[in-house]
Image (cartoon, rainbow, N blue to C red):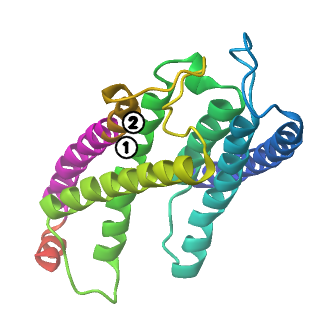
């Protein structure tokens, strides 16, 4: 896909995501006002106020974070590739709209795992892009080794994953939500090791995806430097 087509696709997907999240917020707010406080006996799959509050907060957060990369890009002129925006919008659509509005987290047992693998890989790639921009900057006289770049990309993705889990834990405690899925769709409250499974699975999957991207990025960087002209190699070294 050409750069122009990527730009157009990114713009279209961004608009679809924005209006989808906006409509979801309005729907969740209306349902929040009429939903029961707790599950009625025998109504296992009926949503309560806390469920709609979770969806509302996720949609609001989704709208904020979808605008964040473009704002950062304009402020510091990073030149983030359009395909990164496309992947980012697809991820948010699957995580917020499909995951929360259509209960994909409950309908498909590995939906959360797939999304965390996707996000771990995407954040790892973003870590490589950030360091690459630093290496190519005219204002920074430094050239980082492929091993260090790979290590940074891995740690960057893992740190973002850890921050997200902290956010989920804090939101569950302060707002009484169920972002960490400590309560099943049937209303059963998990305890002990079972309550930690969701968080630990997320972190493990994040790390595996980031590790895979870091390894691929390491060998790709090595090959690029080997194929670079001699004058470029001397400048790098």
Residue extending farthest bottom: 139
- State which mark lies toward you, 1 or 2: 2
Where 101 sits versus 88, above or below?
above
Q: Position of residue 237 (x, y in %)?
A: 10, 76
Where 148 sits versus 39, above or below?
below
SS at badge 1: helix
Which residue is drawn at the image coordinates 26% and 37% (left, top)? Answer: 208
Classify the position of the N terminus by image quarter: top right
CB of mark 1 within 8 Å of CB of mark 2?
yes
Q: Position of residue 224 (x, y in %)?
A: 21, 56
Which residue is drawn at the image coordinates 60% and 42% (left, top)? Answer: 177
Numbered range of the magenta stretch = 204-228
Q: Is residue 132 visible?
A: yes
Which residue is drawn at the image coordinates 13% and 59% (left, top)? Answer: 147
Residue 21 magenta-drawn? no
Q: Residues within 10 Å of mark 1 (few under 14, many from 20)?
A: many
Residue position marked by numbered label 1 in the rendering: 121
Label number found at residue 117: 2
Label number found at residue 156: none
Q: Position of residue 198 (x, y in %)?
A: 40, 32
Residue 214 magenta-drawn? yes
Of residues 43 and 71, the one drawn nearer to the viewer in this rendering: 43
Is residue 144 rendered to the left or right of residue 189?
A: left
| 3D distance between C-alphas at marks 1 and 2 | 6 Å
Is residue 219 rendered to the left or right of residue 133?
A: left
Is residue 165 rendered to the left or right of residue 213?
A: right
Q: Residues within 10 Å of mark 2 (few under 14, many from 20)?
A: many
Which residue is drawn at the image coordinates 50% and 48% (left, top)? Answer: 168
Of residues 173 and 29, the one drawn nearer to the viewer in this rendering: 173
Is residue 206 rendered to the left or right of residue 228?
A: right
Where 180 sits versus 15, above or below?
above
């Amino acid at each position: 896909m050409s750069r122009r087509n990527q730009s157009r696709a990114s713009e279209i997907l961004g608009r679809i995501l924005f209006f989808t999240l906006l409509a979801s917020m309005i729907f969740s707010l209306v349902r929040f006002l009429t939903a029961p406080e707790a599950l009625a006996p025998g109504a296992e799959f009926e949503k309560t106020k806390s469920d709609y509050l979770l969806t509302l907060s996720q949609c609001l957060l989704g709208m904020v974070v979808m605008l964040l990369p473009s704002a950062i890009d304009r402020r510091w002129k990073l030149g983030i590739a359009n395909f990164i925006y496309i992947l980012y919008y697809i991820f948010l659509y699957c995580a917020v709209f499909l995951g929360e509005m259509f209960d994909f987290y409950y309908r498909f047992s590995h939906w959360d795992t797939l999304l965390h693998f996707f996000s771990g890989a995407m954040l790892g790639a973003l870590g490589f892009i950030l360091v690459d921009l630093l290496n190519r900057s005219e204002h920074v006289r430094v050239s980082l080794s492929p091993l260090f770049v790979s290590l940074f990309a891995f740690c960057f993705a893992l740190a973002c994953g850890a921050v997200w889990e902290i956010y989920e834990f804090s939101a569950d405690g302060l707002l009484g939500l169920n972002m960490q899925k400590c309560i099943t769709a049937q209303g059963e409250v998990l305890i002990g090791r079972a309550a930690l499974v969701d968080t630990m699975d997320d972190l493990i999957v994040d790390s595996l995806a980031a590790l895979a991207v870091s390894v691929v990025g390491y060998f790709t960087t090595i090959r690029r430097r080997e194929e670079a002209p001699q004058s470029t190699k001397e400048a790098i070294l």
